């Protein structure tokens, strides 16, 4: 690692941090986009109640033509309906809700696990560090799609339905494939920080290893881990959409951005009802864009080596 993203872990206090974050254009755009998408996801039940359309409720008589073709946007269906007569707007909002409910806890859990493994390996060194690195390499060597398909297939219980809620299985799969990257980053940061003079001084003063980790090393690691959390989260949103697109993520008829796009691909109804494809695709794009802008802004704020132009 050429240089840490944050070399002065105590340079920012909370109030000045939020002020600088809001003044950073990328971060400001990201915060606004993410806030709007979160509000849209939270408003899904309210929009469904206002329109009188449930997430999985079908309105074949009013949303489909006599030939079974979805009608275009109307006052009753602002973004039209899919080929089953379900409200595209309502399902898109619920799909965004599912994406965030999976990606946020999965990425956070991966960060916590990776932080712990990286701290232990990077600080203790020796055989413990070698064991941690071997574990990380082992996890990262698994092919994502094949392993995810296998785990989700094993969760199928036949006629009785899934053994475990698929949402939790998808969270586990994404966490399993994400924590190794956090661990590598955490280990590299710890290896750099433990060479600093303030850590050597704390050791000479007789401070315990756990106290040094808690007071000196973790505060220097967390800001960069937070940046990487914002970078990894949109990747995990796409991972969830990919699993649902392949039919092994959130099962139908529950709405997910991935399985909505998969429905479009199977039916080809987007040729007569473009919002059937555009709504979930735009929701996925805007959500990912928001978190990418936020991560870029966080790095600009927290990295003292970047020069503002």
Image (spheres, helix red, strand yellow):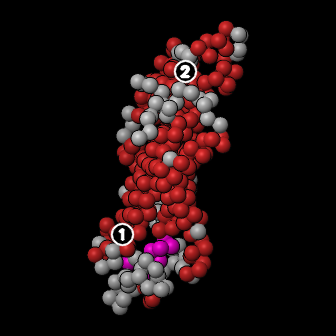
Of discs 2 and 1, which sits in the foreground? Answer: 2
Image quarter (top left, top right, bottom left or bottom right) of the C terminus: top left
Residue 305: horizontal and vertical position, in percent? 46, 30
Asked whether 190 or 267 is in front, the reply is 190
Can residue 66 be seen at all in this image of the molecule? yes
At mark 1, the secondary structure is helix
x 67%, y 8%: residue: 204
Residue 250: horizontal and vertical position, in percent? 48, 59
In the picture, the disc for residue 277 is 1
Question: Quick check: is 185 in the magenta stretch?
Answer: no
In the picture, the disc for residue 114 is none
| Corner quadrant of residue 219 | top right
CA–CA distance between discs 2 and 1?
48 Å
Residue 165: horizontal and vertical position, in percent? 56, 56
Q: Which residue is mark 2?
A: 193
Q: On screen, 263 above or below 188?
A: below
Residue 246: horizontal and vertical position, in percent? 37, 57
- Highlighted magenta segment, given as a residue range: 83-91
Q: Contact (CB < 8 A) between labels 2 and 1?
A: no
- Decide which of tag 2 and tag 1 comes sooner along the chain: 2
Q: On screen, 222 above or below 262?
A: above
């Amino acid at each position: 690692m050429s240089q840490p993203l944050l070399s002065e872990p105590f340079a920012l206090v909370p109030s000045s941090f939020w002020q600088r974050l809001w003044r950073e254009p990328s971060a400001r755009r990201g915060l606004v986009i993410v806030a709007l998408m979160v509000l849209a996801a939270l408003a899904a039940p309210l929009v469904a109640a206002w329109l009188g359309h449930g997430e999985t409720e079908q309105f074949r008589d009013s949303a489909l033509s006599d030939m079974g073709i979805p009608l275009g946007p109307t006052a009753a269906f602002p973004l039209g309906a899919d080929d089953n007569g379900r409200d595209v707007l309502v399902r898109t909002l619920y799909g965004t809700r599912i994406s965030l409910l999976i990606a946020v806890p999965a990425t956070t859990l991966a960060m916590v696990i990776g932080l712990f493994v990286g701290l232990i390996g990077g600080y203790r060194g020796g055989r413990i560090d070698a064991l941690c690195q071997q574990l990380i390499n082992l996890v990262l060597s698994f092919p994502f799609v094949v392993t995810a398909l296998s785990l989700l297939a094993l969760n199928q219980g036949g006629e009785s339905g899934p053994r475990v809620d698929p949402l939790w299985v998808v969270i586990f799969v994404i966490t399993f494939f994400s924590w190794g990257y956090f661990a590598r980053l955490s280990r590299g940061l710890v290896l750099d920080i433990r060479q600093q003079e303030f850590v050597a001084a704390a050791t000479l003063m007789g401070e315990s290893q756990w106290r040094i980790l808690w007071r000196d090393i973790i505060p220097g690691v967390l800001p960069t881990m937070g940046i990487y959390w914002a970078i990894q989260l949109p990747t995990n949103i796409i991972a969830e959409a990919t699993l649902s697109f392949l039919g092994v993520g959130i099962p139908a008829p529950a709405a997910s951005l991935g399985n909505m796009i998969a429905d479009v691909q199977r039916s080809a109804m987007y040729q007569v009802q473009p919002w059937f494809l555009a709504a979930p695709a735009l929701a996925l794009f805007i959500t990912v864009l928001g978190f990418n802008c936020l991560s870029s802004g966080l790095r600009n704020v927290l990295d003292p080596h970047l020069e503002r132009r």
